[in-house]
């Protein structure tokens, strides 16, 4: 299974917004969820992808 298929639709949506340079606060506002929820989705995506930060996650999904 490729990395993007390991992620939920919400995790992929959040990573798309991260790739666009948006902050957790901006993403939370756009998706009408809390910034903490955005952070938790990112933590889960990092764990699934085996990375430790937003730049690595975006690279892994879109370039790797």
Image (cartoon, rainbow, N blue to C red):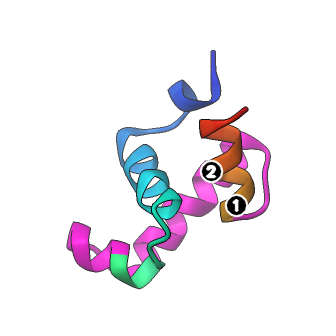
- Quarter of the picture containing the C terminus is top right
- Quadrant in the rendering for residue 3: top right
- In this rendered view, identify the residue nearer to me: 10 or 23: 23
Q: SS at mark 1? A: helix
Q: Quadrant of residue 9?
A: top left
In the displayed structure image, the side of residue 2 where residue 52 appears, left or right: right
Residue 48's image quarter?
A: top right
Magenta-drawn stretch, dominant element (helix, strand or loop): helix
User: Is disc 2 in contact with disc 1, using a CB cutoff of under 8 Å?
Assistant: yes
Residue 58 numbered mark, or none: 2
Q: Position of residue 29 (x, y in %)?
A: 25, 79
Q: Quadrant of the N terminus?
A: top right
Image: 49 above or below 3: below
**Residue at (46% x, 78% y) in the render:** 24
Q: Which residue is mark 1?
A: 55
Segment colored magenta: 27-53
């Amino acid at each position: 299974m490729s990395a993007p298929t390991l992620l939920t639709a919400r995790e992929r949506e959040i990573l798309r917004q991260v790739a666009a340079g948006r902050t957790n606060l901006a993403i939370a506002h756009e998706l009408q969820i809390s910034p903490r929820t955005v952070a938790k989705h990112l933590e889960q995506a990092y764990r699934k992808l085996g990375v430790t930060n937003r730049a690595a996650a975006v690279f892994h999904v879109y370039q790797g």
